[in-house]
Image (cartoon, helix red, strand yellow):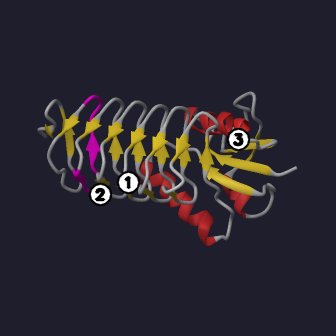
Amino acid sequence: MKTLAIIGQGGHARVLADAAEGAGWAAIVLIGDTPEDPAPWPCAGSLNELLHGVVEADACLVGIGDNSTRLGIHRCLAREAWSTPRLLHPRAGTSPRARLGAGSVVLAGAWAGVGTTIGEAVILNTGATVDHDCVLGDGVHVSPGAHLAGGVRVGECSWIGIGAVVRQGITIGRDAVVGAGAVVVADVPDGITVVGNPARPLER
């Protein structure tokens, strides 16, 4: 019986555990520093214990919402030659001509279209859609109910907020944030937060 270790003990980790059960993983443990078990999945130990072989598992996923933290731990696991599988919820889907990177997850009701390339440690959250020929960099999070039209490019570790809409052909830079419900009709530079309809840079 193969065991999947999910790093994290919060809400996103439990969402991944639930999706992994639906995808057929028979044994699932969570990894974190809090000894209390976030029922119904047991906490098997800390990340340090996992990396030093105290906790045994066949594969690992990072169940942490913060993009840079998630990507950093994912890359650490890759350097240590851990298996970091792709996770597809049984009620999610991708085109057979879409590419999904290691450690990325597609959650319930989400979809990735034909020609789309999704990097590593990416979250396509509940009900999110990414249409044809999009390119998502490593560590991106597309929040629940967000929709990317065709040909959108999103840079590493950027976050598309809940219910946001991105027009076709738009480029969103690295470490950018698209606020909840925003409608993006122009390119977003690196490190910028945009909000509103149409989306504009947030005043500092």
Residue drawn 49% across and 57% down? 97
From the viewer's perspective, is 84 left or right of 37?
Answer: left
Label 1: few (<14), some (14–19) or many (≥20) C-alpha neighbours in 10 Å: many
Mark 2 neighbour density, 10 Å: few (under 14) some (14–19) many (20 or more): many
- Residue 134 vertical position relative to residue 89 in the rendered view, above or below: below
Residue at image x 48%, y 45%? 123
The residue that mark 1 highlights is 157
Residue displayed at 30% across by 43% down: 149
- Residue type, label 1: Cys
For this view, does 115 lie left or right of residue 169? right
- The disc, 2 or 1, on the residue closer to the chain's N-terminal end is 1
The magenta stretch is 169-181
Q: Is residue 146 magenta?
A: no
Asked if the residues shown at circle 2 and circle 3 are in contact, with their CB atoms under 8 angstroms apart, the answer is no
Q: Which residue is mark 3?
A: 23
Q: Quadrant of residue 195?
A: top left
Residues under numbered marks 2 and 1 in contact, where contact means CB atoms less than 8 Å apart: yes
Residue 20 - label: none
The answer to which of marks 2 and 3 sits earlier in the sequence is 3
Spatial CA distance of label 2 from label 1 is 6 Å
Looking at the rendered image, the disc whose residue lies closer to the viewer, 3 or 1, is 3
Per the picture, the main secondary structure of the magenta-coloured stretch is loop
Whole-Å distance between the Cαs marked 3 and 1? 26 Å
The part of the image, by quadrant, that contains residue 26 is top right
Q: Specify the amino acid type for callout 3.
A: Ala
Give the number of marks.
Answer: 3
Which residue has dot 2 on it? 174
**Looking at the rendering, in which quadrant would you find the C terminus?**
top left
Residue nearest the observer in this picture, 152 or 46: 152
